[in-house]
């Protein structure tokens, strides 16, 4: 009987800890109907931004039109990402969601990157793309997706998209965070401020210092 009580107690503890972990690793639930971000303060708080005064909130705070237009893909990677997160769309503050749009020229790539605070799901608007993510055991899960398809990238895992069609491609993205964050792997490693020491990158990628500097030059501010 004592052992059964001990087991039951451990099970309750395990469930409690699991619920705590699930709560910690997601955007916290809001404690009010709405909390439109007051960007004028310029201060980020633990759970989003300071709320705008209720008397100053209006319906336009809950509308964002930035995803309607195709983004320019005239750049080195041939892609463009337009974010609809709390920094651009104040009405999302404390709601735990955001969206985005990614446009691709033929052959364009959204380089390997992560979203440390969110799971991402995409809906293909047009074109054909190769998409994939890599697990912590270094397994690649990749698919070709086309117009109307949906694909999900698990939270914080490295992932990418590449246009494999003959024409342009575009996707809508959604996140379970108001500010999912994005870390581009190439930029993070070769374009940080201050820069990572060449010796670290040289050892990690099995290349000499000259090659490291050459790669870093591609990510210096212009």
Image: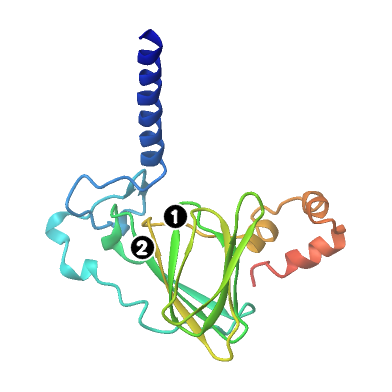
Residue drawn where x is 23% and y is 67% of the image: 62
Report the residue marked by disc 1.
118
Residue drawn where x is 67% and y is 54% of the image: 138
Q: Is residue 19 left or right of residue 186?
A: left
The answer to whether the residue labelled 2 contacts the one labelled 1, judged by CB atoms less than 8 Å apart, is yes
- Front residue of 94 and 146: 146
Report the residue marked by disc 2.
98
Dot 2 surroundings within 10 Å: few (below 14), some, or many (20 or more)? many
Dot 1 surroundings within 10 Å: few (below 14), some, or many (20 or more)? many
x and y percentages locating residue 21 in the rendered image: 41, 37
Taking 112 as reference, is 79 above or below it?
below
What residue occupies the far top of the structure in this picture? 2
Residue drawn where x is 64% and y is 73% of the image: 222
Residue 190 lies in quadrant: bottom right
x and y percentages locating residue 72 in the rendered image: 50, 83
What residue occupies the far front of the structure in this picture? 1
Image quadrant holding the N terminus, namely: top left
Q: Is residue 50 left or right of residue 74?
A: left
x and y percentages locating residue 26 in the rendered image: 38, 46
Residue drawn where x is 25% and y is 71% of the image: 63
- Front residue of 165 and 111: 165
Taking 168 as reference, is 64 above or below it?
above
x and y percentages locating residue 12 in the rendered image: 35, 25
Q: Earlier in the sequence, mark 2 or mark 1?
A: 2
Residue 11 lies in quadrant: top left
């Amino acid at each position: 009987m004592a052992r059964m009580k001990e087991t039951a107690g451990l099970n309750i503890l395990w469930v409690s800890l699991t619920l705590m972990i699930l709560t910690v690793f997601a955007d916290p639930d809001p404690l009010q109907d709405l909390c439109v971000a007051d960007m004028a303060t310029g201060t980020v708080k633990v759970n989003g931004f300071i709320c705008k005064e209720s008397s100053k909130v209006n319906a336009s705070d809950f509308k964002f039109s930035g995803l309607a237009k195709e983004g320019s893909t005239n750049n080195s990677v041939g892609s463009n990402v337009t974010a609809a997160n709390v920094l651009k769309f104040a009405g999302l503050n404390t709601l735990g969601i955001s969206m985005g749009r990614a446009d691709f020229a033929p052959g364009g790539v959204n380089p390997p990157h992560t979203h440390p605070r969110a799971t991402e799901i995409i809906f293909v608007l047009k074109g054909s793309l190769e998409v994939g993510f890599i697990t912590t055991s270094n397994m690649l899960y990749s698919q070709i997706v086309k117009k109307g398809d949906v694909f999900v990238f698990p939270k914080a895992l490295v992932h990418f998209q590449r246009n494999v069609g003959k024409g342009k491609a575009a996707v809508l993205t959604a996140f379970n965070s108001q500010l999912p964050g994005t870390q581009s792997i190439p930029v993070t490693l070769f374009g940080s401020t201050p820069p990572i020491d060449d010796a670290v990158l040289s050892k990690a990628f099995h290349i000499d210092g000259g090659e490291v500097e050459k790669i870093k030059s591609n990510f210096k501010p212009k």
